[in-house]
Image (spheres, rainbow, N blue to C red):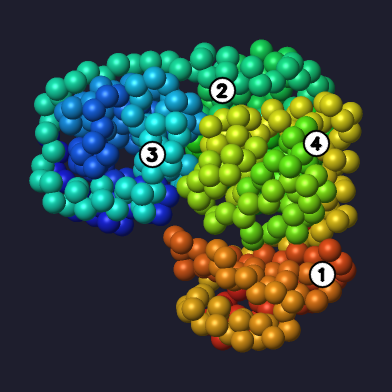
Amino acid sequence: MTFSMNNNSSSAFRLGDVRGIYPEEIDEAFSLSFAAAFVKHFALGDTVATGRDMRESSAPLQHALNEGLAAAGVEVMDLGLCTTELGYFSSVQDDIDATIIVTASHNPPEYNGFKCVLSRGVAVTYDTGLAEVERLMQTMGPPAQQASRTVTKVDLHPHYIDFIKTQFQPLTSTHIALNGLNGTAVTLADTLAHELQIPVSWFRKEPGPIPSQGANPANPHLAKEMKNFMAGRAFDLGVTWDGDCDRCVFFDQDGNLIPTYYIIGLLASSFLETSPGAAIVFDTKLCLNTLDVINRYDGRPVPAETGHAFMKLAMREHNAIYGGELSAHHYFGDFYYCDSGMFAWLKVLEVIKNSGQTINDLVSEYRNNVCCTPEISVPLVDAEAAFSSTLRGYEKVARRVDFFDGLSFDMPGDWRFSLRQSKTEPLVRVNFESRGDPDLLLEEAEKIINGLDVAGSDWRSELTIQ
């Protein structure tokens, strides 16, 4: 097989993975070159597992990746169509040096990329290896194209499903709505539902083609689709996964999206009830309620930077039992400190079953404790000016200013806000929360958002409480 090297490699390398438009930024030649550089940098010599999501470009990209890995001198375990978490599971198998999943997660269909972990689920990021892989791709020359090792197809789904079943008892309930967004969730969730005796009805079940706007479960249009699917039917809960199944969001009996912030509180509480004092990892964009839950059980709060690599690192370093991220990634100590859409939905079902309450009943405590706005993504001409002007305006009146993973202010009146610059887009993510008056929070939020005009903001929308 002969390819010409794509010269746009640098635009595809992100902080936590590799992602770009196919074939302009990532193509088969890119896959071959990436494989050679990855093996060389990490000095791999045993076996690398590979898998792929449902995108049309994923099969040819994985095929080229497999060829490149075999030519570079490692055995290849081809997992086929699979979730990213199956890739994490593969990384703990004997003799697996690393796993590479071909996926662009929730991005639109024209995107693709690679998510990589080393043995036992250790995340590979730009700072921990991808930068050097990128450099090698630009300096190594054409990769070898004659395979010196073999590619073996292996189906790990039965083994992973058996592993999950050791963590959960049968979860018989009335009726659950599942939405795979035409991603890979069905490769695990359908069998698990049957074997754990969970009655389900599916929407967007089969893998591919994904929605034109991407397989993002929090997308308002796709959330409305789910609400319409659930309307007038006796569902106890709705669950939607993203394209590669590592994000998981929940809907109440009426099809309303439940803010992930409150799901984090629910799961943290559940784990701490049985393991008081355990470590809980969380991102700090919204955290008042999470801290209240952790403190109630004398848990150990572990703030982490936003992003799967930072969350996994914090989980591992602190031997955390659970971690929750507002992007709807949920991390589990029992799953090698990795994120899992399967563990997340089954754990929520377990909490519902054991409590005898509805999901709305369970999260109402957290809603009443802390109110919050949806995350606001503000397009800005000058993000640095936004941070500087906000700091000047609020540092003297704030009870506390924190520069961890952005900028956050604890304000008199028991409310809080945070700003964080997107690592991939010209946006600032702004979040507001309060233990007090929701109307006052909206008033203060409007002032702060309007103040960002000095940095070139053109954001105009109605602020609401979730």
**x%, y% of residue 328?**
62, 45
**x%, y% of residue 325?**
62, 49
- Label 3 or label 2, whichever comes before in sequence order: 3
Kindly state the secondary structure of the residue where label 4 is placed.
helix
User: Is residue 193 placed above or below 181 in the rendered structure?
Assistant: above
Question: At label 2, which amino acid type do we have?
Answer: Leu
**Which residue is denoted by mark 4 in the rendering?**
273
Check disc 1: other Cα within 10 Å, few if <14, some if 14-19, many if 20+.
some
**x%, y% of residue 453?**
59, 83
Q: CA distance from mark 3 to mark 2?
A: 20 Å
Question: At label 1, which amino acid type do we have?
Answer: Asp
Q: Is there CB contact under 8 Å for labels 3 and 2?
A: no
**Which residue is denoted by mark 2 in the rendering?**
188
- Label 2 or label 1, whichever comes before in sequence order: 2
**x%, y% of residue 244?**
50, 36
Q: Is residue 325 left or right of residue 30?
A: right
Q: CA distance from mark 1 to mark 3?
A: 41 Å
Q: Is there CB contact under 8 Å for labels 1 and 4?
A: no
Quadrant of the frame with the N terminus: top left
- Label 1 or label 4, whichever comes before in sequence order: 4
